[in-house]
Every structure is written in C-alpha cells, then in structure tokens.
Image: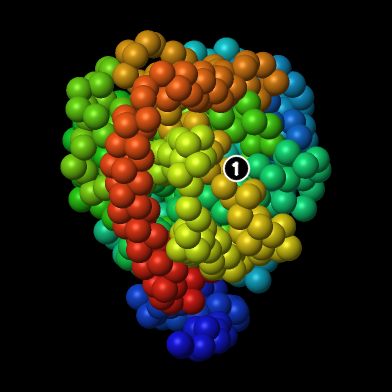
Amino acid sequence: MTDARSFAPQPRALTYSTGGAATPVVEEHAFPDDFASVLEHATVHRSTIGCIIPAYNEEESIAQVIEALLGQTRVPDVIHVVVNNTSDATVKIASEYSGPHEITTELGEQFTEVFVHDIGKNPDKKVGALNYGYSLVEGYDYLLGVDGDTIADSKAVEYLETEAVSDSRIGGISAIYTIDDKPIKGMIARFLTAGQRTQFAAFNLQNLLRGRNMAVLGGQFSIFSTNALREAMKQNHQVTPWVKDSEVEDSLLSLQIKSAGYLTKISPYARANVGGMTTLSGYDAQQVKWTYGAIELMWPGQRGDTKGQPFHPNLRLRWFENFGMLTNLFVRVAFLTLLAGSLSINAFVFSPLWLIPPVVAMLLNLRIARTMASVDRTDVLFAILFFPAELFMWIRISHFVRSWTRFLSRKKVDNWAMQAKAERGGGLGHWTPMVVLIAVAIALAVIWVLVGPMVQSSILWIGWPIVGVVTVLQTLLMFSKLVRRHHGYKV
C-alpha cells in the first residue's frame, strides 16, 4: 500500500503582482500539478472584485464576516452588505464598519470601502438581496458572494482570484466549506455539527476528485466572473443573475454558467467556515429546501421558467445522491423488517459476513474524516463509533423522503419561510418521518401476524437474497471509494 506521506505537502512559492514589486508568499500545501502550476507561475494583473454579503438576521456573525474580509491578504475593492427583512441588530453592527479602509497586507497597500444597505422588506429574500448587490458591482471584473455567517481564511480571496484570472474559461470558483465546531455546545448541536462536517467533507472531496468541477457554486463563499454572469443572463433572457422561482438559486446559476460554456470549479486552497444548523428542526428545513430545489432542477417542466435539465452535467452527481439515498432507505427498512420477521418465527441465523458492510462504512467515514484539514477528536469518534453516523444517515433519509413527498404532492410551499421558522425554533415537521415509520412498522407487524407460516417463509426466502445482493453491491461501491487515491487533497 502506498504510504500516505508520499502526498505530503511541500512548500511552494506564489508571486502576486500588485502593480509594484512582486511579493513572494510561501504556501504550505502541494496539490496536483494542474492547480499547483497555476499558483507557481501566476503573475496576475490587479483585477477588480466587488463583494456582496446578503444578510438576514445575522447579528451574531456579521461582525466576524466583515472583519475576515478586511483581514484578507487580497481585500475586495468594495464590500456591500445588503440587509433584507431583518428584525435584529444586523444593520447597526454592520454599520460600525462602513466607510473607507486602508489596509496593509503582505501584498502591499490596499483600499476598500464598506457600504451597508438596508433594503427593508424584500419579498424575494436572499435572491432579491443578491440581485440588488449585483446592480452595484456589475462593472467589476469579479463578484464575490459571501453569506452573512461565513468566516473566510485570510488567503481565501487571493487564491480564488489567482485561479480565476489565470483562465478566462472559468465562470466561477467555490471555496472549500466546513463548519467550525469549537464554539458549538450541547450534545445534539455537536452531533449535528459532526454530521454536517462529514457531509461537507464528502461532497467537497467528491468534487475535487472529479477534476475539481464544482456542481454547485455555493453562495457561502464563491467568486464569479461578471462576464460569465452577463453571458448566462443573455442566454436565459434574464435581467438579473439569480431568479426567484428556484429553491436553490446557487445551483441554478451554476447550471446556467456551465451551459454558457464556462467552467465551474472548486479551489483546493481557499477555505471558509460556514454557519451550521444546530437544531434538528433547522437542519431538517435546510436540507429539505436544498433537496426539494435539486429535484426541481432534475425533473423536467417545473414551476416558473425553471426548466428541468435531467441530463445536465452538473446534475449527474445529484442523481447519484438521490439514488444512493433510495438504496440506503431500502436496505435499512428491508433489513429491519426481515430481521424482525425472522426472529418472530425463530428462523434467524447470524452470519459474521453481516459485519463486513458496517466495518467498510466505518473505515470509509474514518478516511473521509482524515481528509479534513481541521479534523479533531469528535470527527474521528463520529466515524468509528458507527452509531452516530448511522443515526445521522437516518436523519438524512428522512429529509430525502420529505423532499420527494412534498415534490410529488405538488403542494406549493415556501421552503425559505419554513427554514426561517425552523431556525427560530418553530415547526414539528421533522418528526413526521419518524411517526410515519412507526405507523408503517405497526402495519407490517399486523400483516405479518395475519398471514400464515407458509407466506412468512416465502417472504423471508425471497427477501433475504434481494437485500443481500443490494448490500453486496453497496459495499463494493463503498470499498471502491475507500481505496481511491485522494491525491493529497484536504477538505
């Protein structure tokens, strides 16, 4: 087996031109040649970057977000905080940073100015704030979108700009996202954060290993070429980059940029900590909104003018994710049903081979955890204890079921409003899948008792081989991911 240390980081020199003397910056990471060569030989002109921060009730984080941007080695040329529908002190806190700022960094003297816009009641919510911000920076070379709870590493903007300038084909680049779990308190909050960190790590790693092609340029911290935005708007007959008739405005814009002939990438260097969900209701509402919106993009002929594009390259990963969740649901429900049926008629026979799938799953989770740049004890325990990861999978399955049920019902729901309500502590919808599961279990138990012994034996005789075959295939897929080379990437 190849020693993992063979992919250990090596120092590289990056030269960044600011119009004066070039300043050498020593970087501590080495990645595949395609990106390392960009940094190693990059001498770029001073492009212009306009930053937009759509903010809704972000009083707890907005100060850190702005300070992180002002602390960048490459400071955006202008920062617009667009506050919408807020009911807290976001405007007051952000306004403390408004005005011009002269900053000295390792790249030289830099100037930026912070503007705070309170646009009041905005029916288009985040999309409206983003489009308002776009109108303020459309004359710049690049638009940097930053969520109101995202804290970027000090070199994040520098890395994104360096690669964007190096290749005119790039329409947008996303940073690597994770969640800072150090300030998180409480058992449920820490459990959910550990699961989300693993979820982010797996998603980011998958995109990095796919040629760094990013299916979704997340609004958390991504830079867009304004030329690419204009071309996407032109091709789709839009007057703004983001449209309001999609639950996942960032995914739709990423598709449009890709369809316009541009590349959508993920940076292996730029990093940012995003705000995670610390309650079951909040996490449920967020995931249902994201999954529901992704289904709308996959399925032809959805609401508004958001045409379904089931075969779009950016959606292949979405199809695999949904098929994977369906498989996970089937295997778990079928296994528990057949196990209960076997025990009820004393036909259960344990086989040590049954331990192989959970062991492979634990090893895969551990390997994903080890790829995290900020891996800690909680991440490792989450992976190797099996039960936390398994419980988190059941929670994700519930989101999958709720999203598809809501979509197939054709019921019009404001998922943005439902997420906001859940984050405030309202709503009990996240318990619905558990209630349904219990009801289904009771119904199956009654049916099992009513059918005769011959039918029971037939069900077990047919069911176990089917579950066995699906489980074997699923285990082989996990094993292939387990042994796949990661090329030194850290997420």
Please indicate whether residue 10 sits to the left or right of residue 414 in the image: right
Q: How many marks?
A: 1
**Residue flagged by tag 1: what amino acid is it?**
Leu
Residue 284 visible, this angle: yes
Q: Where the N terminus falls, by quadrant? A: bottom left
**For this view, does 139 lie left or right of residue 299?**
right
Residue 441 screen position, x and y as percent: 50, 25
Residue drawn at point x = 59 percent, y = 68 percent: 370
Coloring applied to the structure = rainbow
Q: Is residue 141 left or right of residue 488?
A: left
Report helix, strand or loop for mark 1: helix
**Above/below status of 374 relative to 230:** below
Quarter holding residue 404? top left
Frontmost residue, 381 versus 309: 381
**Residue at x 69% of width, y 36% of height:** 278
* Along the line of sight, the residue nearer the viewer: 226 or 328: 328
Percent of width and height locating residue 229 = 32, 41
User: Which of the two residues, 408 or 342, is positioned nearer the viewer here?
Assistant: 342
Are there few (<14), some (14-19), or many (20+) residues within 10 Å of tag 1? few
Q: Is residue 469 above or below residue 25?
A: above
**Residue under the image location 29 percent in, 60 percent down:** 168
Which residue does the image show at 71% across and 63% down from the upper left?
Answer: 376
Residue 110 place in picture, x, y as percent: 62, 59
- Residue 105 drawn above or below residue 33: above
Residue at which label 1 appears:
391
Rendered-image quadrant of the C terminus: bottom right
* Residue closest to the eye, 212 or 155: 212
Instruction: Please say whether residue 379 is visible from this viewpoint.
Output: no
In x, y percent, where is residue 260? 21, 45
